[in-house]
Image (tube, rainbow, N blue to C red):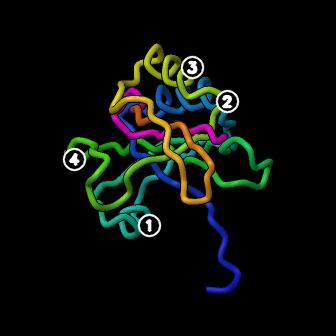
Amino acid sequence: MHGTRYVHTNLIARDWRALAGFYQTLFECVPVPPERDFAGPTLEAGTGVPGAALQGVHLRLPGYGGGGPTLEIYTYSRLADGPSPAVNRPGFGHIAFEVPSVAEARREVLRAGGTAVGEIVTLTTAAGTRVTWCYVTDPEGNIIELQAWS
């Protein structure tokens, strides 16, 4: 589709304020006012969730300036149970951040309540460039890739 532009990725959180704080502190995401607080028939119709109400915020992702994409973090008034995160499950798998040091970023994520998924590894692409990366989770279990290129 000509004229398409990527806008945001959504995370549904148990505690949107705490999760937004994690991404602001560790990855320098910036809130895009106003905070969102939606409820009523239009939201119910759009989501297909009877009695839906949600609150949250958009966070500008780092590295793209004021018009770049956002990470939308919302909490619904009623949350559905979901499967545990897995890096190899079909569908959306993770969000990725390029960082100066994967090891230091991993330590910071773990200190902030995230968990390790795998080890830090370095792969060489077919073009000869090297990427050092690992998977971790945020405090709510969403998978994050940390990567550094050389």
Q: Residue at x 67, y 38 (%)?
A: 31
User: What distance separates the C-alpha of mark 2 from that of mark 3?
Assistant: 8 Å
Q: Which residue is mark 2?
A: 100
Tell me the kind of residue under disc 2.
Pro
Q: Which mark is residue 82?
A: 4
Q: Earlier in the sequence, mark 3 or mark 4?
A: 4
Disc 1 to disc 4, C-alpha distance? 25 Å
Residue nearest the observer in this picture, 120 or 65: 120
Q: Residue at x 80, y 48 (%)?
A: 65
Q: Residues within 10 Å of mark 2 (few under 14, many from 20)?
A: few
> Which span is picked out in magenta?
137-150
Instruction: Return the residue at label 3.
Output: 104
Which quadrant is the C terminus positioned in? top right
- The mark that comes first in sequence, 4 or 2, is 4
Q: Identify which amino acid the numbered label 3 is placed on.
A: Glu
Question: Gap in Å between the C-alphas at discs 2 and 1?
Answer: 43 Å
Residue in the foreground of this view, choosing between 67 and 106: 106
Which residue is at the front of the view, 81 or 28?
A: 28
Q: Which residue, given by chain and number where applicable, does mark 1 sit on?
A: 42
